[in-house]
């Protein structure tokens, strides 16, 4: 829903919204697209399958989580309750 108008009535703001539309529908209504581009957009839009797009996104997110978990396992796990000893570089810098 896109905000079309705001007006103040008795100290309150009243908002008027347009009907809910997809960006594709708004682009076609704007008449700023050439007819050739409009036909290519129509073929692309009709070829899209929202369910398949969601499955692809879910697969990619799962893969991203797996990669993060592998990276997390490789990193050094630090116990926050154990007293930490400074590394040699840190202690060398503190001494000078």
Image (tube, rainbow, N blue to C red):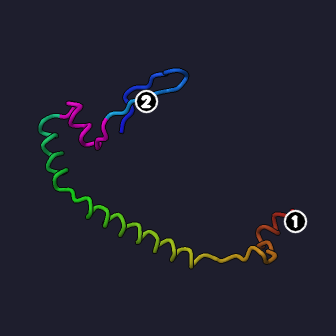
Residue placed under numbered mark 2 in the picture: 15
> Is residue 12 or residue 68 the one in the foreground?
12
Q: Position of residue 11 (x, y in %)?
A: 55, 22
Image quadrant of residue 20? top left
Q: Residue furthest front?
A: 10
- Residue 18 lies left or right of residue 45; in this view the side is right
> Is residue 14 or residue 79 the one in the foreground?
14
Packing grade of label 1 (10 A; few <14, some 14-19, many >=20) is few
- Residue 16 lies left or right of residue 47; in this view the side is right
Residue placed under numbered mark 1 in the picture: 95
Determine if the magenta segment contains residue 20. Answer: yes
The magenta region covers 19-33
Q: Position of residue 89 (x, y in %)?
A: 76, 69
Q: CA distance from mark 2 to mark 1?
A: 65 Å
> Is residue 35 or residue 26 the one in the foreground?
26
Closest to the camera, between mark 2 and mark 1, is 2
């Amino acid at each position: 829903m896109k905000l079309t108008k705001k007006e103040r009535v008795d100290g309150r703001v009243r908002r008027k919204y347009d009907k809910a539309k997809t960006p594709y529908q708004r682009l076609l209504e704007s008449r700023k697209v050439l007819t050739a581009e409009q036909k290519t957009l129509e073929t692309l839009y009709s070829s899209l399958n929202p369910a398949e797009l969601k499955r692809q996104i879910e697969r990619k997110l799962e893969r991203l989580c797996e990669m993060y978990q592998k990276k997390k396992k490789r990193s050094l796990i630090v116990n926050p309750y154990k007293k930490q000893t400074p590394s040699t570089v840190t202690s060398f810098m503190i001494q000078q």
